[in-house]
Amino acid sequence: MSEIWMDVDIAITIPVNKVPLVALSDGYTIDETIAYNESGMDLNWNFVTTAGVMTQTNVVPTTAGDYDWTHIGNGMYKIEMTASGGASADNDTEGFGWFSGKADAILPFSGPIIGFRADALNNALIDGGDNLDINVVQWLGQACHAVSENGVPKVDLDQLGGVVQSLTDLKDLVDTGYDPTNHKIQSDLIYIHGSALTETAGQLAAAFVKLLDVATPVLTAESVNQSANNNTILAHADHGNAQLVRSTTPANKLDVSATGEAGLDFANIKNATGAHTLTNITIPTCTTNTDMRGTDGANTIVPDTAGIAAGLHATTDGKIDDNKSELDGLQGADGKCVISTDAQDLSASLDVNTKTATATALDLILKDSTFALAIADAIWDEILTGATHNISTSAGRKVRQIGAYAIHDGTAQAGANVSITLAATASAIDGTYNRNLVVITGGTGIGQTRTIIDFNGTTKIAIVDRGWRTDPDATSEYQVVPDDTPLVVDQGVAQAGSTSSTIKLRAYASATNDIYLCNIVIIIAGTGRGQARLVDAYNGATKVITLCGDDWTTTPDDTSVYVIIPYGVTCTACLGANALASINTEVDNVLNTAIPGSPTADSINEKIKALPSGIAKNVALSAFTFYMVLTSDHVSAATGKTLTGQISKDGGAFAGLTNSITEIGNGLYKVDIIQAEMNADVVTLKFTETDCDQRIVVIYPT
């Protein structure tokens, strides 16, 4: 249904969005700054013709072109569209269109659906006044005549009742037969039912006046009323009611069961070949219903039983079998037929009397009948197997394939924060459903999904990977379905006996010592949830993991659900506290050992000894070199400058350097610092010039 109607085949401005554009960052702040060339702008014109053909055209907004993008206000935008000849979309076709799009800074958006139709329709239905103006240009595909006098159209009547009229027929009727004073049609009576009248006009007029005279009319209601006996016709002695053939007892009916009874030949009268005169006839009273039946199917008015059976093609057992044979003969090449069962089998299978149209039989054809509903129930309750439901694309096969995704389903017996007790029909084998998903499909907790960590086949209790938001109970319907579980080494519920630096795994955990070394153990539910530690050691007999590094913040207990995942590094990356202490000691010993006078070739000691010594304290420093840049751009080398050098020792006041500064070139300068100036723990040098950046250098003599 269109939300807006617009004229087609004109240049127009179209609303881009139905609701304000909002920021992607929070989803509700209205964005009034979206430009035509916004980053990530993707604007599309969707269009459906009245014939149902849908297209989509990408439109690039402009700021001074065919598709100018403009902000109207409060996050609402509009765009121009050409009537024809545009770079992309044009308003040149009747139908329905709307914009959709997105940009980097906003949520995706869609505009209102706009109907495009001829401007005359919009002018008449929307823009016009209270009356609907219609300009008729054709009648049944033929052009209308031009309007004549006073705005009344001309009409040429070519036929009356399918008979072609001459150019003067109707004109003659109006000219000679119409009384304009009394507004009545005048007629001259020449024929009555095709017979010419020989009477004069005066005679005919006198006869009509006598027949319909207001004072003493001959034609009255009483003269034709059959219930009255006092009118001229019905009371006539020779031709009225007194001479009718009838029973002397009004309740009795006419009965003629044999030819010639009471002097009346019934067959001859029914098939009369000439006139018969009935006089002095007594009609006997009808005594039984058999008197109205005959045996001759060709001549009787009311047929007997045999006639009824023959006429209705009575549905006896034999007849149904005959019909079944006839219908089986209509069997098509595809192997289908209308009826393929015996009449008795049909009756027994449908539990209905096939020979009698009883309410039970009619129940077969009613869509909400007991029989139809029973068939539907039987179909839905039928067991689906590969042997009987394997036709490609059939409903039975599709449902059977969908059902294959469900490992187990039922109604829970109970539930807790991190567990659900499955139905008694669940597997009796421990761990059967481990690492699959349990989905609450009905009842309490509907919509929740958890991964099964551990399943007990005896108690039917499944431990899940995290606590339920709503704990399931005995009303919770569930399904167990396959899950793409992440790589997990082991998972389960911890046993009692964990300490601040250990965790005791489930009894089913590995019996191999240090099998979980250097993995990560994470508490995902129960006491201590959210903690993760590295494994330093594992005792396969006691199922106890010793942590590497920090102790638990909250010690786990027998409600703690854990999972062990690979760490992805070599074991040397996971070091216990004792190993770290030993390494620290060894490193300290190495660092505290003096470098020998003649270290081993290519050893660390040899490389260290070969390193140059630092700037010495209280020793003259020759040709100390530094770089100067211009103040104008802080990058270009300052050349040809006369610099001033100063020195501060151990944070004291600056004083001029003893030796002058000389230029090396390309912004580099040097100076010799005497021994006395280097006799300090911290020596700070400062070099300045009017159009150069100041240079500060700090030296830490050793």
Image: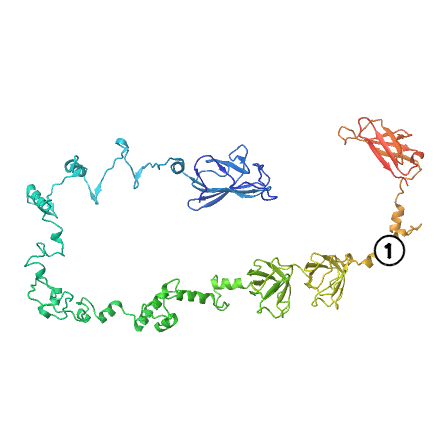
Residue at point 8%, 58% (across, down): 240
Report if residue 295 is visible in the image.
Answer: no
Report which residue position mark 1 lands on. 586
Q: Estimate the x, y position of residue 564 in percent, counting from the top left.
A: 70, 60
Q: Estimate the x, y position of residue 336 in percent, counting from the top left.
A: 39, 66
Q: Is residue 431 above or below residue 162?
A: below
Q: Nearer the viewer, residue 378 or 184?
A: 184
For disc 1, the neighbor class at 10 Å (few under 14, some 14 to 19, many from 20) is few
Q: Is residue 223 above or below residue 686?
A: below
Q: How many marks?
A: 1
Q: Estimate the x, y position of residue 316 in percent, counting from the top left.
A: 30, 72
Image quarter (top left, top right, bottom left or bottom right) of the C terminus = top right
Question: Which quadrant of the structure image shows residue 198?
Answer: top left
Q: By what rule are the colours in the image chosen?
A: rainbow
Residue 111 falls left or right of residue 331: right
Q: Nearer the viewer, residue 628 or 364?
A: 364
Image quarter (top left, top right, bottom left or bottom right) of the N terminus = top left
Report if residue 532 is visible in the image.
Answer: yes
Q: Is residue 686 above or below residue 41?
A: above
Residue at point 56%, 59% (across, down): 446
